[in-house]
Image (tube, helix red, strand yellow):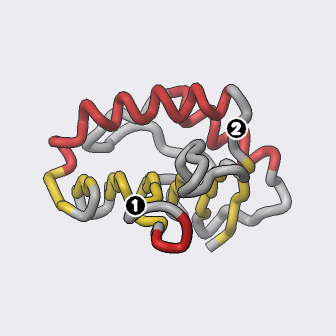
Amino acid sequence: MIIQQTGYPLAISKKLILILNNEIELHSEVDTSSGCIFNFRDPGYSAESGGYHPVEIYIDENGRFQNLTDFAYVGGDGHYAELVKELNFDFSYGLFQHMGRNYPIAQGKGLFEIWQSNFCAYYQNKVFTVTVEEL
């Protein structure tokens, strides 16, 4: 799979593309020809102790970003906490979602740039366990 780098309403960083290409190589047993979902998880992340938010990235069969989601716990500690979408950049529908509210994706530009920079730094620091799933 070749991940497309241009033609999006928000700029995708070269670092993010390199990360995803690296994970495709590391998970070469996964058939990505019909698209794939990348899951980045901090094994120690919990509502009680915090940690790095889980991230899911969906790439379609044409190598195009469809959806990028950052999850977080809300609603308190312990068994009352619920893992929900905190940030969602839906490239297929042109929507930016923050804590359940929808906005045109262009309104998420600044937050997306910050998110990408942070995510790439976390990845470089090896805080995530990564899986790649075929569609």
At label 1, counting other C-alpha atoms closer than 10 Å, the crowd grade (few under 14, some 14-19, many 20 or more) is some
Asked whether, in this view, residue 71 is left or right of residue 126, the answer is left
At label 2, counting other C-alpha atoms closer than 10 Å, the crowd grade (few under 14, some 14-19, many 20 or more) is some
Q: Residue at x 28, y 58 (%)?
A: 99
27 above or below 119?
below
Image location (x, y in percent) of residue 84:
42, 65
Image location (x, y in percent) of residue 43:
72, 52
123 above or below 33?
above
To which residue does mark 2 refer?
Answer: 127
Residue type beneath disc 2: Val
Choose between 111 and 65: the one closer to the eye: 111
Q: Say what secondary structure mark 2 lies in.
A: loop
Q: Say what secondary structure mark 1 lies in.
A: strand
Residue type beneath disc 1: Val
Gap between marks 1 and 2, in whole Å?
Answer: 21 Å
* Quadrant in which the C terminus is drawn: bottom right
Q: Where residue 74 is drawn, which disc sits there?
A: 1
